[in-house]
Each structure stands twice: as structure tokens, then as C-alpha cells.
Amino acid sequence: MQKYPDTEWAVSDGLIPYEAAVQFMEARARAIREDGAPELVWFLEHPPLYTSGTSAKASDLRDPARFPVFDAGRGGEYTYHGPGQRVAYMMLDVARRGRDVRAFVHNLEAWIIAALAAFNVEAGPRDGRVGVWVDRTQSGGPLREDKIAAIGVRLKKWVSFHGISLNVEPDLEHFTGITPCGISDPRYGITSLVDLGIPASMDDVDMALKDAFETVFESRLVRAPAPLQAVS
């Protein structure tokens, strides 16, 4: 049953510049709080880049000259964005949705987990490690867990922005320029749907995320025009 009003859902084609995306998110978050604009879930891809969160350590940026580096202002440490990764930016009124940041982050995890279940991928959170993880331990072998999705959000006046990134088919080697989320333990790596042997298209992933959002966040997604398109 739908508990909250409809939420707009937009998909931008091509690779969206990071700074332009942040400017749009900040403006939309203000409009939601001050003008009653609809909430928005925005799906996009970025060109290759690294972002740093409020807990990022300089030593975790292993190759600072490789890709552009942006101060994201969100929680967390360093992360990578690039082609083949579905980024979902969430501009939601968390005050209306319970005013509970912990529950909001839990719902983001549950959203990703439910979407991955549509591809028969069993994933989950891990204590002390942000994001959503897949157990890849071989029978009788040492522990091995890989992150398949990252979470990093920021709230202004109880409206969220930034969000999640789900690895569909990115170049996993690009993650080697950072210590992703500050985790250097060799037992923990990075994976994607394609790396797991699941050749999902971005459209398939978008539909799985849409269906899971409507269940977890109890709000129907209604298609809206894309805020930005790629600059050629």
C-alpha cells in the first residue's frame, strides 16, 4: 500500500558532469523544502571520477592524477563513479518520512538488496563496512566479500541528496586508484553484476530499482523529464 505521495523518477542518458549534478541536487533539495517541489529519484552515469566524503583520508587517494577528484560533502570516504555504474541520487523529504536518519540509510540498503534479489544475487550490509556486499568465499577457502554498491548521503533541512551507486558493468580496475571507503583489507574487494556472471542491462537494473523503491519506500515512482543530459 502506498504510504507517501508519488515521487518523481528521472533517467539521464549519457555521462553527466559531476559538478552540474551536485548543483542540480542542491537546488532541487531547496525547492523541496522551501517550495514544496516533488521528491525526485534521479538515475544517471558519470564520467570516470573520484569523490571524497567527510571522513576521507588523503592517504586513501592512491592515484590523484588519474581522474578528477571532487569533494562530495556527503558522509563516507573515497569512492569511484564511472560508466557502467548506476548512480541513483535521492532527493527525499526525510522529515516527512519519519525524521530518522538511521532508518533512512537502512531503507537505502534494503532497496539495493531487493533490487539485486531480482537477479538472484544475495547481498547484504556488513557491520562496520558501509554499503552492500556479496559473499564470494569459496567452499573451504578463506573469507572473501566484495562490495557491489556504495551508499553516501547528505541531508539539508531534512531533505536528502547524493544517494547510492550500484556496479552494473564498470571497469573495476578504476577502483585501484583509491582505497574504496577506506577499506584496505585484502579479504574485501569490489564486484559488479557482470563480474558475478550476470549480463544485466542498465534498463534491467533500472526496472529492478524502480520496483524495489516502490516497495521499500512506499511511494510510487512517476516518470519525469531528465534534469540534465550529457554534454557532447
Image (spheres, grey):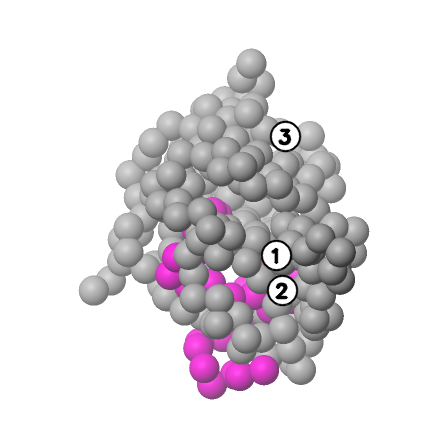
Q: Residue 134, image x and y in percent?
A: 63, 50
Mark 1 or mark 3: which comes first in sequence? 3
Q: Nearer the viewer's eye, disc 1 or disc 3?
A: 1
Q: Mark 3 points at which residue?
A: 97
User: Mark 2 to mark 1: distance in Å?
Assistant: 6 Å
Residue 87 sits inside the magenta stretch: yes
User: As drawn, is 212 to the left or to the right of 221?
Assistant: right
Mark 3 or mark 2: which comes first in sequence? 3
Name the quadrant of the C terminus. bottom left
Q: Mark 2 points at which residue?
A: 189
Q: Give the range drawn in magenta.
A: 62-89
Secondary structure, mark 2, is: strand
- Above or below residue 109? Residue 222 is above
The reply to whether dot 2 and dot 1 touch (C-beta < 8 Å) is yes
Image quadrant assignment for residue 74: bottom right
Image quadrant assignment for residue 184: bottom right
Judge by depth and name the residue closer to the eye, 21 or 136: 136
- The image's mark for residue 147 is 1
- Furthest residue toward top: 1
